[in-house]
Amino acid sequence: MDLTFSEDEVRGAFRLGRRYEGAPGLAHGGVLCLVLDHLLGEAAIAQGVGGMTVGLDVRFRAPTRLETDLEVVARVARVDGRKVHLEGAITHEGRPTATATAVFVQLDAAKAAEIFPQLSAS
């Protein structure tokens, strides 16, 4: 997926093939969650407020068909201290097939070193 970054959002375009099938001819909901979580993370990083997902709420609005052109958009909605609130959507022909809201938490240096010791061992 190629991503484009603007001042306030991240966008991507993609297609899902048969290997991502859930119900016949449709994308698996778990794959759509993965795409949304990833793009929400990219949006947070792009705004300098990257963190880890602590809550992800996905709503499936319409079937997401395989082998169709899909778009995804994600943005930071607001930041409350270390909590980053995000929103995003997967669309087909301008209509949402899945929408998401999420809360990420920014890590302080001590917590980051605890979770990712391999990064601080330099």
Image (spheres, helix red, strand yellow):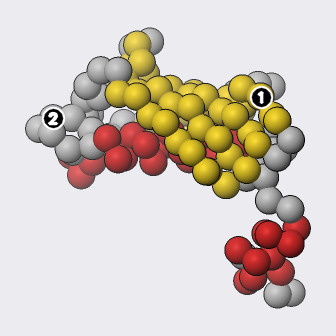
Residue 9 placed where, x, y %? 70, 27
Q: Which residue is mark 2?
A: 25
Which badge, 1 or 2, comes first in the chain's sequence? 2
Name the residue rendered at 26%, 25% in the picture.
Answer: 63
As drawn, is 3 to the left or to the right of 26? right
The C terminus lies in quadrant: bottom right
The three-letter code of the residue at mark 1 reads Arg
Q: Are marks 1 and 2 in contact (CB under 8 Å)?
A: no
Judge by depth and name the residue closer to the eye, 93 or 30: 30
Residue 56 in view of the camera: yes
**Residue 109 picture location, percent across and down:** 88, 67
Task: Residue 97 in the image: state x and y as whole percent.
Answer: 37, 23
Relative vertical location of residue 78 with respect to residue 121 in this rendering, above or below? above
Question: Crowding near pointer 2: few (<14 within 10 Å), some, many (20+)?
Answer: some
Distance from label 1 to label 2 (Cα)?
A: 36 Å
Up-down relation of residue 37 to residue 121 (above or below): above
Amino acid residing under circle 2: Gly
Judged left or right of residue 52, residue 18 is left
Question: In the figure, 120 relative to 84: above or below?
Answer: below
